[in-house]
Image (spheres, rainbow, N blue to C red):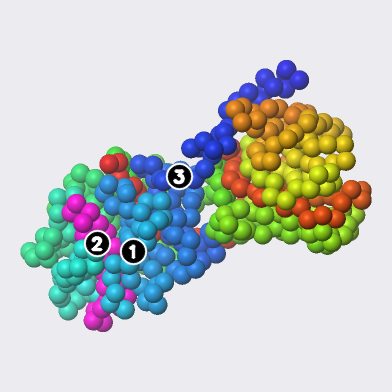
Amino acid sequence: MRLVLGLLVGLLIGAAPGSAAAVRSVASPGALIFSSTFSGDREIFTSAADGSSRVDLSKDPHADVTPAWSADGMRIAFASNRSGSFEIYVMNADGSDVVQVTHDHAYDDRPSFTGYDKALVYESNVRGNWEIRRIALDGSGEIDLTRNRAADRYPAPAPGGAIAFASNRGGSDWHLWVMRSNGTHAMQLTRQPGGQSQPAWNPSGAKIAFVAGTPGQGTSIWSMLRNGTKPRRVAAGLGRDESSPAWSPDGTSIVYQDCAAGASTECGVRTVVPGSPPLDVSTLRAPWVDTFDGGDSRFWQVINNGKGATNTEQNGQLVTTLAADSVEGGQYNEIETHWGTQCRLVGDFDVQADYRLLEWPQANGVQAALSSFAGPSNIGFMALRESQAWGEQYGSWIPQDFVSVGAGDPAGTLRLQRQGDTAQTSYWNGSSWVVLASGPTITDPATVTLGASSFMGRFVHQEVQVAWDNFRINAGAISCGSPWWEDDSPDWRASP
């Protein structure tokens, strides 16, 4: 046992329940924001710069797109069709207090904060032509800045007050322009053939990143000095449509949208340090948390045996219910309901989940379990909380070995860890992790499940309910096969 614990010491530091690391929080400086279909419809997500700690902020059934951070990192502007047409909205950095800013029933998109975050600039076709407009956060003082017959799009306020934008003035190609914050003194910056659009200022205002090329035929990310000189290619994916660049807070990296050329529905987000290979941010990475607020259910698949047991998301929890009239059945003659991960954990991993006993009759014969299954034979190990005729207890199953300790907790946290071919199960005692057991396991990619079961005729036919929350992958490589989601339109949160 001491040898095994020594091997696992690196995994025992995982996030404690209730700690800042174990629950979702407001994004930190340097966080990314982007639009994603991860939850099914298009939502606003935030993540760490490497793609970990992915969180759905908007949680609305309509399309929420093109988000942008305020300079102080406290608010987010975005476009949404939740009112029937695409309008501009602002919300707090944690997704709360959503306010509609524009009400013109046109197509308003790509908002950016300007000045001291008291106003927004955005593109709008309110009169059938794309123009750059400005509006105060309270919806007052709306003004058309460009007032030009050409199409003017993709506004990007500079730290010093100027606004860069793209326009097809003077021809069919798009080029970059810059104007004062009041729309005057417009000056053309680029003239290269093929088109340039989607400008983005670096934090100092000395450089502009932009998109070069024709969408659908291959585009790439470039940068140049603010006067339009010294253009330099930043990202160079062959056969790709690269777009929507934004700079990191220190100005050394750029985040951008990457799609297969001509395939706007096969997109992801990448970051790149000029001269280095890009990092795919859209790959799901630990730490990852599901708070069961209805946003991440596509991450799970349903596993049932017998009749009468269900798993449903309710009030920000996953509620497992075994109805009083539940009946054993299935291959293993049991009452069972679990949610299992669609993605698999490869190699070493560390996962945990909070539980709360909602309805828990004495000696009910039910095991509420956090489990892992791997390999063709679904060899698994689990940590559980159960109520049996012989008492209330925490339990651990690692093949051929079941151990248990007495328990009186109506709520707590269960944990599974795998390092190499060693599995370990634990529970949280309110101040530290208590190891239940450790032993050998297989190393195949693993599915993790949450739920409850009863077998061998032990169920006493009184309703049992257990609530699960804060399912967390603390560590481990997450493999989802072909992703079911796409990410686009990223922005990078500045350091206040």
Q: Position of residue 152 (x, y in %)?
A: 22, 70
Q: CA distance from mark 1 to mark 3?
A: 21 Å
Q: Nearer the viewer, residue 404 or 159?
A: 404
Give the mark, 1 or 3, whose residue is nearer the N terminus.
3
Image height of 428 relative to 86, above or below: above
Residue 386 found in image quarter:
top right
Q: Residue furthest front?
A: 362
Tell me the quadrant of the picture where the C terminus can be found. top left
Query: Which labelled disc corresponds to residue 133?
Result: none
Badge 1 vs badge 2, beta-carbon distance below 8 Å: yes
* Few, some or many residues within 10 Å of mark 3 (<14, 14–19, 20+): few
At horizontal 75% and vertical 40% (from top left) the residue drawn is 385
Of the residues under marks 1 and 2, which one precedes in the sequence? Answer: 1
Query: Which residue in the protein does label 2 denote?
Result: 137
Residue interval drawn in magenta:
106-129
Disc 1 and disc 2: Cα gap in Å?
Answer: 9 Å
Q: Is residue 341 left or right of residue 138?
A: right
Tag 1: amino acid: Val
**Secondary structure category for the residue under label 2:** loop
Q: Position of residue 370 (x, y in %)?
A: 71, 43
